[in-house]
Image (cartoon, helix red, strand yellow):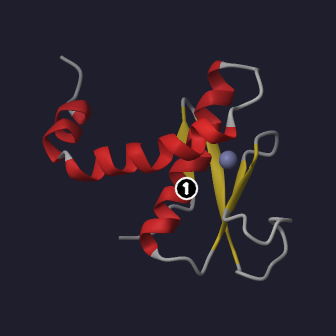
Amino acid sequence: MKRPESIVVLGQRFTVHWEPYDAGLLNEPDKAGRTDLMQQVMHIRQGAGFHQTRETVLHELIHVCLNLVSSREHDEELVAGLAPVLLELLRRDGQLMDWLREPDE
Ligand SMILES: [Zn+2]
């Protein structure tokens, strides 16, 4: 499946920039992703495994969602903890995903 080039969250389109591993755009060497909320650009470092990359995109999406609902600074520990839990849930429970994706009545 093709990796996302943009992701729409509540009508706001975030462009995904797939950054080379050594691009230096992520500032910190161990950082896998960063989202510029003002520019609506998500920078995702390439070179990690598929599972890790998905988790990074979900991690950045949680930041986007939290920013939409609250102006408070995000709890990085909460975001880091939520991403793998949500990814596991979304991947494992196909019935739940089908039900959530049902068209409105
Ligand atoms: Zn984060």
Q: Would you identify the image quadrant in which residue 28 lies?
A: bottom right
Whether residue 68 appears in this view of the structure is yes
Residue drawn at x 56%, y 58% is: 56
Percent from the top left, x then y, of residue 78? 59, 36
Mark 1, residues whose alpha carbon is within 10 Å: few (<14), some, or many (≥20)? many
Q: Secondary structure at mark 1?
A: helix
Question: Would the CB of label 1 be found within 8 Å of ligand 1?
Answer: no
Image side of residue 92 versus residue 76, left or right? left
Image side of residue 36 versus residue 51, left or right? right
Q: Would you identify the image quadrant in which residue 43 lies?
A: bottom right
Image side of residue 49 versus residue 11, left or right? left
Residue drawn at x 48%, y 77% is: 49
Quadrant of image for the N terminus: bottom left
Whether residue 43 appears in this view of the structure is no
Percent from the top left, x then y, of residue 93? 19, 45
Q: Which residue is mark 1?
A: 57
Percent from the top left, x then y, of residue 36? 78, 47
Q: Give the vertical position of 77 relative to 99 (above or below).
A: below
The number of numbered discs placed on residues in the rendered structure image is 1
Residue drawn at x 66%, y 54% is: 15
Q: Give the vertical position of 19 relative to 62 (above or below).
A: below
Q: Amino acid at mark 1?
A: Val
Percent from the top left, x then y, of residue 32? 66, 65
Residue drawn at x 68%, y 60% is: 33
Quadrant of image for the C terminus: top left
- In terms of depth relative to the viewer, which is nearer, 36 or 48? 48
- In terms of depth relative to the viewer, which is nearer, 92 or 64? 92
